[in-house]
Image (cartoon, rainbow, N blue to C red):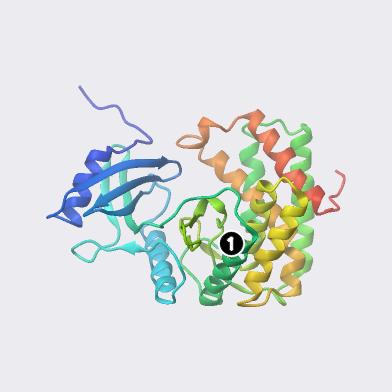
Amino acid sequence: MDIFPVTSSILSAAGIAHFVKARYWPGNAVTASIVKTGINHTYLVIAGGVRYIFRVYSFNWRTELEIAEEIRLLNLLKENDVPVSYPIADTRSIYIQQLNAPEGLRYAVLFSFAPGEKMLQFPAQLHWQAGAIMAKFHKVSCNLELSRVQYSTGSLIEPCYSFLRQFLQEDTEEMIFIRSLQQYLRETFGKAGEHGLRKGIVHLDIWFDNLSISDNEKITLFDFDFCGNGGLYLDIAYYILQLYSTETVESQYLLKRDQFIDGYESVTRITEEERTLLPAAGAAIYLFYLGVQCARFDNWSNVFVNDVYLKRFIMLRVKRWCDFNRMPLPTL
């Protein structure tokens, strides 16, 4: 009987353990368990009592070159003492593994384990530390470039609408709002110019879900899967955007936002031009990730993406952020 073709599979944890043992620690006992399935699949690997993370990239999600560039960035950050989860080479000094999955060739990388845990809400002084870590990362990455995506105004805000049309009618309140926001963002970034805007390599996904906080309150940054090239203010904007979504009390949000900014500026300054663009940049990144969720419907987001979810996300997250920052969106 022929095997029916698949578009996405979950690889056996036992198979992953066997694979990792052969490539990294032939003489040690190795176990593996699934931590999370999403755009990529994450396995916890334990070898010799030490924990590691084995990331299996989804089929056709990242090219080998894009993954190699992510590895190059992480090794650079590790060399400069930025606290990150870093890649680990196998016994042949190879970082990128190839797995013949049912859907086709998938890539995988072993990473060091980020000690500690994720915390949805944490004290203001830790937001200060997160700001300082981001700034240290930016000092290393400023004016550098990867052979990866360029995060421009167009790439952030334009794809979203066509993806949303698969789920929402164009005459709905939500879609009218999205068109209005896109127009506002085009005009805002069009007026900004280049002066005072630092460029380099950005993470584009720094928030509580990608920070691990240990008992001694040390932060480790991980998951650079969305790293690329763009304005460094994008990372700052995304962090304070996500902080706004998790802190329901405005006074706490403002306190922690200011602590984060103070921590960042203890290492390097945020220019006035960048500061002015932070609200618009946060909205642009919201649109970008809405597009990602819709685009990956076939193999990841179908467990939650539907018209109800999208309407709630648009009106209770994106519009709320725009209203809080008093963005003068045009009437269409």
Mark 1 crowd level (few <14, some 14–19, many ≥20, 10 Å Cα): some
Count of numbered circles in the view: 1
Q: Is residue 309 above or below residue 124?
A: above
For this rendering, which residue is in front, 22 or 148? 22
Q: Secondary structure at mark 1?
A: helix
Residue ranking furthest to the left: 27
Residue under the image location 75 percent in, 72 percent down: 273
Residue 86 x/y as whole percent: 38, 63
Residue 107 x/y as whole percent: 32, 51
Residue under the image location 78 percent in, 61 percent down: 188
Q: Is residue 196 above or below residue 99?
A: below
Could you say which quadrant of the image residue 325 lies in?
bottom right
Could you say which quadrant of the image residue 114 lies in?
bottom left
Is 260 on the left or on the right of 138, as rendered? right
Residue ranking furthest to the front: 216
Residue 321 x/y as whole percent: 75, 49
Residue under the image location 80 percent in, 50 percent down: 324
Residue under the image location 54 percent in, 50 percent down: 119
Residue 14 x/y as whole percent: 23, 39
For this rendering, which residue is in front, 22 or 218? 218
Q: Is residue 252 above or below residue 230?
A: above
Could you say which quadrant of the image residue 71 lies in?
bottom left
Is 293 on the left or on the right of 67, as rendered? right
For this rendering, which residue is in front, 87 or 32? 32
Is 316 on the left or on the right of 144, as rendered? right
Amino acid at dot 1: Leu
| Residue at mark 1 | 126
Tell me the quadrant of the picture where the C terminus can be found: top right
Is 319 on the left or on the right of 108, as rendered? right
Tell me the quadrant of the picture where the N terminus can be found: top left
